[in-house]
Image (spheres, rainbow, N blue to C red):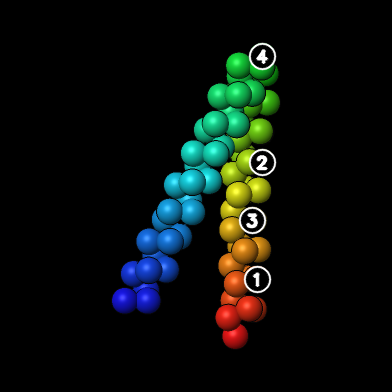
Amino acid sequence: MNVAVVLLTTALVVVIALLAAVGAAVLARLDGATYPTALKQAATTFAAVITLAAAMTAALAAVRT
């Protein structure tokens, strides 16, 4: 049961990070950025969301124990 919850949560976080990255790329393109610049913005956003999720997980794990 715990493994399933962890896998589903991980999948959800990755999907949310991908959606945020796509949104950042679209906004960058609407602002007139080139495709490489928009891709860079998307990659930065994806990394930021994953990093935030990892930090929140570490904080919650520290509080829980």
* Residue at the spot 37% in from the left edge and 76% down from the top edge: 2
Q: On screen, 56 above or below 60?
A: above
Estimate how packed mark 2 is, as few (under 14), some (14 to 19) or many (20 or more) residues with alpha carbons within 10 Å. Answer: few
Assess disc 4: are there few (<14), some (14-19) or many (≥20) residues with their C-alpha within 10 Å of its C-alpha: few
Which mark is first along the chain, 1 or 4? 4
**Percent from the top left, x then y, of residue 45?**
63, 41
Residue type, label 1: Ala
Q: Which residue is labeled 3 in the image?
A: 52
Disc 3 to disc 2: CB gap under 8 Å: no
Q: Which mark is residue 44?
A: 2
Disc 4 secondary structure class = loop
Q: Write down the residue under mark 4.
A: 32
Looking at this view, name the residue that lies furthest to the bottom: 65
* Residue 22 rendering spot, x and y as whole percentages: 52, 33
Q: Is residue 30 above or below residue 47?
A: above
| Residue found farthest to the front | 63
